[in-house]
Each structure stands twice: as C-alpha cells, then as structure tokens.
Image (cartoon, rainbow, N blue to C red):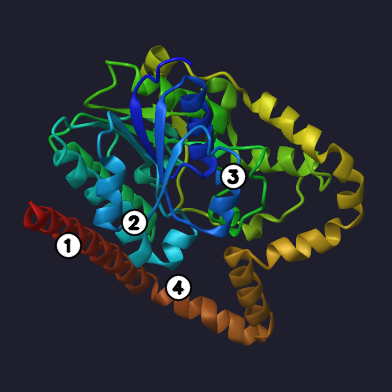
Amino acid sequence: MREKKLKILLTGAFGNVGLSVLKELVDRDHDVRILEIKNRKNLRISRKIQEDVEIIWGDITNKFDVEKAVKNRDVIIHLAAIIPPLADRQPNLAESVNVGGTLNILESMKKQANHPKIIFTSSIAVYGDRVNNPLIKVTDPLIPSKGDFYALTKISAERLVKESGLDYAIFRLTYITSINKLELDPLMFHMPLETSIEICDTRDVGLALTNAVECSEVWGRTFHIAGGKSCRITYREYLNDMMAIMGLGRGFLPDEAFAKDQFHCGFMETHDSQTLLKYQNHTLEDYYSDVKKKYGPKGFFIARVKSFVKIHLLKKSEPYKRFKFFKKKIGSFTISENKLIRRLLSRNFKKIDMLETKIEELERVIRTLYEENKKLEIISNI
C-alpha cells in the first residue's frame, strides 16, 4: 500500500463540486477526512466511499465538531455553504454556515501547533450583474446584485480568510455544470437571457482544487475557476441548446419568464489559474454531448408532454407571475383609465425616479452597516 500524501479536511464533500474534489483526492492517495451533516442523502453517499476516507458527522456551525475535524490536518478545502435559492429564503442559516462556519474553521486552524493552509471557494456572484460588461477580472470591484444575500456572505467569508493571518488560496467559481445535476431549478428564471455565461464542468473544478493543494504558487492569492473560451455562450443560446437536447425545442420558454437584471455571471479571466493548475479539459460541446447521451432515450417521451412541462416550469417563474398579473390588471381597465394611468406615471416620473434613487442609497447604507457589523464581530471574537 502506498503511503498517504497530505492530510486533508474536505467540507461540503457530498455536494456537486465536493464529490468531484473527493474523487481526485482519493485517486491521488491523500489522507482525506470529511466533515458532513448526517442526513439520509449523505448517509447513502457515504456507503460508497467509507473505506477510502474518514468521515466525521457534524455541523460546521458547531465549534467542537469543527475542532475535531481540523485537528492534525495539513490543508483544509472548505466548500461547505448554503447556496441559492435556500440562502435567499433562509438568510440567517446562510449567515451562520457561510460566515460563522468559515470563522469556526479559521479559529480551529489557529489552535493547531502547525497551522494548516486553507483553500476557500467563493463565487462569481460577488461581482453582481455583469450583463453590460461581461469580462470579469479578479481585481474587479465586488458589487453584488440587489437582494443577493448569498453573495454578501461570500464577500464576508473572503475577508475573514484574507485577514486570518493563515496561508490561504481563494477560488471564485463560475457557473458549474454536472451531468448528475440537470434539474430545472426556479433559480434559472433569475438570470437575464442576455447574460454572458462561462460554464465549467464539475470534474474540472475537482481537478483544479486538487492541483492547488500541491501548488506552492497559489497561496496568498485569489483566482477564477471557469471553463475557458470554449465554454462561453449567452444564457439565451445556452437555454435554447439545452431545451432542444431535452426534446422541448428552441424558444421553449417566453422572454417574460426571465428577470431583466440583478443576477450575476459573465466571462471570467482565467489565465493565471489555468497556467498553474491546468484543469480546463471539458468544453461546452462536451457537456452537450453528455446531456444528449443521458436524455437521448427520453427525448421522444418529453416531446409528447412538453405543453405540460411548460406550464409546470412557468409556475416556478416569479417574473412570469408578475407579467401575467400586470397584464391581467391592465387588460381589465377601460381605454380612458389606461390613458389616465399613463398620464399619472408621466407626470410623476421624476418623483418615482427620485424614490428609486433613495431606495438604492438606503440599500447601500444597509450593505455598509452589514459589513461594519461583520468587522465588529470579527474584532470581538479575536
């Protein structure tokens, strides 16, 4: 039996990216320990890999569980996080896991005689809406979209990592694809159709983060992880391609079902990460090919029930619900009432515009107060 290489703690191991990282780590004979929540899904997954890794069932928000998991590790790969849409529905949970859990990891690392290094995964969400300026550099300002609490937690966690005094590497991940995660989530309607996206296969992310463990040049730096130029497309074309592959047809969903702004994604500059980690192995066409293999036998059946699929999907779209509501309301007014509404809106446009500006200023103040509060919490915990 070959000697194990590095002692690694992997959080979020049973998620989409986590399983890809886990496979790479095990294949390279690293000594892998996992910290995961004990539930039915995770127990099912654990039965397939128990012999290869050590599993600690625990909660990242529990300091004692974290201390036990971090003990005697060389590197921490910290993936665990509450992601949208759950992060938006339960912001307190997202805060406790994404920020509080990260703080627990860092404090436990500092208690070790030999401080481990940390690889932390952040998100493209920290850059906010980039429809009009899609090319993203690591040095670009972090301006999350309105209401994106998940992005705020990632920005706070990044700051904790950078200010910890520990050796770290931060990786901001793009739109991650996996053949095992093809559900049509309501979150799909939050992205404007004109958004530029750059996918990255989950297997390539696993390769990148595993390569980073053994790369001396990543520490103290922030990188992008994305698929490269062969993985770039607009969201509209991506959806058209995917719907066609699934047997639903191009132009399957109306434009009104999608938000017009305030999401994220774009084309990420990845020269540095690719040069060091050499992970960009799968293209967008490769992904389409994998999806075709999975949906090929189902295409005929799906095509026959696509009207029902469309109704089901549109029920999940908040933008489409608003569109239908206002369309119905406008249609119920008389011609003279419609004229009056337009006249009132026209006369009060400046007031409405000023109100929107005040709301934006208030949101900026709230965001600033939130960040200052995080700094105070960090100081009080030192």
Q: Mark 4 falls on what kind of element?
A: helix
Q: Nearer the viewer, mark 2 or mark 4?
A: 2
Question: Are the residues tagged 3 and 2 within 8 Å (C-beta)?
Answer: no
State the residue position of label 4: 346
Q: Residue at x 58, y 64 (%)?
A: 319
Residue kind at label 3, given as amino acid type: Arg
Q: Nearer the viewer, mark 3 or mark 4?
A: 3
For this rendering, which residue is in front, 160 or 274? 160
Residue 153: percent from the left, percent from the top? 31, 53
**First-in-chain label (3 vs 1):** 3
Residue 93: percent from the left, percent from the top? 37, 64
Q: Mark 1 falls on what kind of element?
A: helix
User: Would residue 166 be visible to someone looking at this image?
Assistant: yes
Residue 212: percent from the left, percent from the top? 36, 22
Badge 2: residue crowd in 10 Å (few <14, some 14–19, many ≥20): many
State the residue position of label 2: 97
Q: CA distance from mark 3 to mark 1?
A: 45 Å
Q: Mark 3 falls on what kind of element?
A: loop
State the residue position of label 1: 369
**First-in-chain label (2 vs 1):** 2
Residue kind at label 4, given as amino acid type: Ser
User: Would residue 143 be visible to someone looking at this image?
Assistant: no
Q: Residue at x 67, y 37 (%)?
A: 179
Q: Nearer the viewer, mark 3 or mark 2?
A: 3
Badge 4: residue crowd in 10 Å (few <14, some 14–19, many ≥20): few
Residue 283 occupies which quadrant of the picture? top right
**First-in-chain label (2 vs 4):** 2
**First-in-chain label (1 vs 4):** 4
Residue kind at label 2, given as amino acid type: Val
Residue kind at label 1, given as amino acid type: Leu
State the residue position of label 3: 47
Q: CA distance from mark 2 to mark 1?
A: 20 Å
